[in-house]
Image (cartoon, helix red, strand yellow):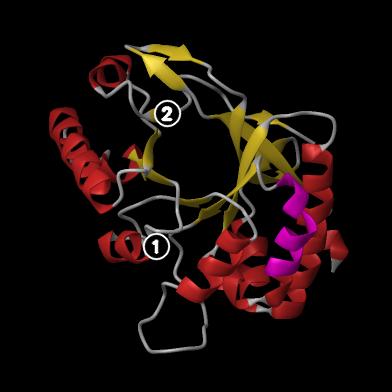
Amino acid sequence: MLDKYHHFCFFKQRIVRKKGSQKIIKEDEYELLLRCKRGETYVFPGKELGEAMVDRLEHKQYLKKIERLLEGVLLNNSEIYSINIDPQELCYEETFHLFEHFKKENQRLKIELTEHLPYKREGAYGDVCFLEHVTRLYELGYEIVLDDFLSGVNGIDQLIKLSPFISRVKISKLIFNKSVCDSTFCAFIYEMSQLIQEINPKLSLVIEAEENAEMIEKLSDAWAYQTYYFDQPSKVN
């Protein structure tokens, strides 16, 4: 089963601040992007990841690879990283073993909770919050990020329930690209930022996938950005 994950690796993309349309690097912070080498290219391993999510034994093998990759990523540098965790993974005890193992790095390893619906779960019908599980990660000292807010399970209700335990909210422009004009998106994001601040004034906001220089200049310098406009992902290991 290990062979399935042999070609897995991490790419990293910088999260930056800005002034106008110019990036400002205040600290070395990146999101880790899981990729798999196929031929001469690197792609997101959706099939393999899906199989790992639905089978606990498969997931244990997958986490062994992730542990080895993280060991390499965190070695001999002081950079800050965030790693994606699907809600389904919160149902597996091995996920918590992984983060207990890296607890000494909890000041520079953040956990991003993705928007994906869990394949199977225990507990009340309709409960995809996993508040008890998120609390466990929080008590290990990790910063927790709500990824792809407004997509999948990460809606307003999720934000409200998890707001005491998260430090950051990320909104991707991608879900708006085909149906919302730039001016509407810009106005919406400012309103949404205000709503997020009312829910928890300590929450920071990251805008993802905005690649237009004119739009970036119109958006707030108080937010952080993760875009190809500022940084192309690069292979870590």
Image-based side of 33 in relation to 167, left or right:
right
Amino acid carrying mark 1 in the image: Leu
Whether 56 is drawn above or below 202: the answer is below
Q: Is residue 231 magenta?
A: no
Q: Residues within 10 Å of mark 2 (few under 14, many from 20)?
A: many
Q: Which residue in the protein does label 2 denote?
A: 225
Residue 36 in the image: state x and y as whole percent: 71, 47
Residue drawn at point x = 67 percent, y = 48 percent:
106
Mark 1 vs 2: CB contact within 8 A: no
Residue drawn at x 75%, y 44% as measured from the top left:
9
Please name the residue shown 60% across and 52% down the image.
142
Disc 1: which residue: 162
Going from N to C along the chain, the mark reached first, 1 or 2, is 1
- The residue that appears at 64% across and 62% down in the rendered structure is 49
**Mark 1: secondary structure:** helix
Q: Position of residue 34 (x, y in %)?
A: 65, 47
| Residue 205: x %, y % from top left | 36, 38
**Magenta span of residues:** 95-105
Q: Position of residue 203 (x, y in %)?
A: 37, 44
Q: Nearer the viewer, residue 158 or 3?
A: 158
Q: Is residue 17 visible?
A: yes
Nearer the observer, 25 or 185? 25
**Residue 14 lies in quadrant:** top right
In the foreground, 201 or 90: 201
